[in-house]
Image (cartoon, rainbow, N blue to C red):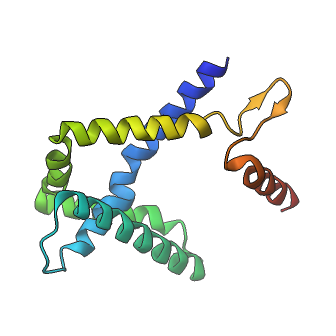
Amino acid sequence: MLYTEIFKQIGFLAIFLALSLPVYYIPGKLLLRFCKHKFRADEEILLSYSLGIVLGLLSFSLFSLIKLWLIYPFFLVVINVLVIRKNGLEHLESFKILFKQKLLMFLLILGTLVEGFINFPSGMHYQLGDLYWSAQGHDGLWHVAVVQAI
């Protein structure tokens, strides 16, 4: 039972990572192209994601303020189609360079899994109820209380 929940959560993580490319990385990479500085592959990935998150928050906030928040997914699709149509998959070159560094990728994946195994099962429903531990022990309960109060 516990293992199926963990694998389900890992599946959700894979879906999130796949969707993070068109939602965060490509719009951020588009903004990063205006910078004249040449970045290393790892810097480019980090900055593209960071800029994409900021752009996403600003865009969604703007669309929410004008009561058109449902347009945001359409906005993302248009940006991605235009970028991919113009440049193909050129934006993913940084990932190819990063994935060629086998030791770095092994350490990143191993570190993510080791740190994640502490938190992956946190917040799942067990026979005794929902259990939270590690850093989410207090914070997870507080968020559940806030959601229920809303």
Q: Position of residue 16 (x, y in %)?
A: 45, 45
Q: Nearer the viewer, residue 74 or 125?
A: 125
The residue lying at 16 percent from left, 58 percent from top is 85
Callout count:
0
Q: Is residue 7 above or below residue 42?
A: above
Identity of the residue furthest to the top in this view: 1
Q: Position of residue 33 (x, y in %)?
A: 18, 73
Q: Position of residue 46 (x, y in %)?
A: 31, 62
Question: Which image quadrant for residue 131?
Answer: top right
The residue lying at 51 percent from left, 80 percent from top is 62
Q: Nearer the viewer, residue 90 or 46?
A: 46
Where, quadrant-wise, is the C terminus in this rendering? bottom right
Q: Position of residue 115 (x, y in %)?
A: 51, 40
As drawn, is 23 to the left or to the right of 136?
A: left
Question: Which image quadrant for residue 22?
Answer: bottom left
The residue lying at 84 percent from left, 32 percent from top is 129
As drawn, is 116 to the left or to the right of 45?
A: right
- Asked if one can make out residue 78 in the rendered structure from this viewpoint, the answer is no
Q: Is residue 14 above or below residue 149?
A: above
Q: Nearer the viewer, residue 55 or 85?
A: 55
- Asked if one can make out residue 146 in the rendered structure from this viewpoint, the answer is yes
Where, quadrant-wise, is the N terminus in this rendering? top right
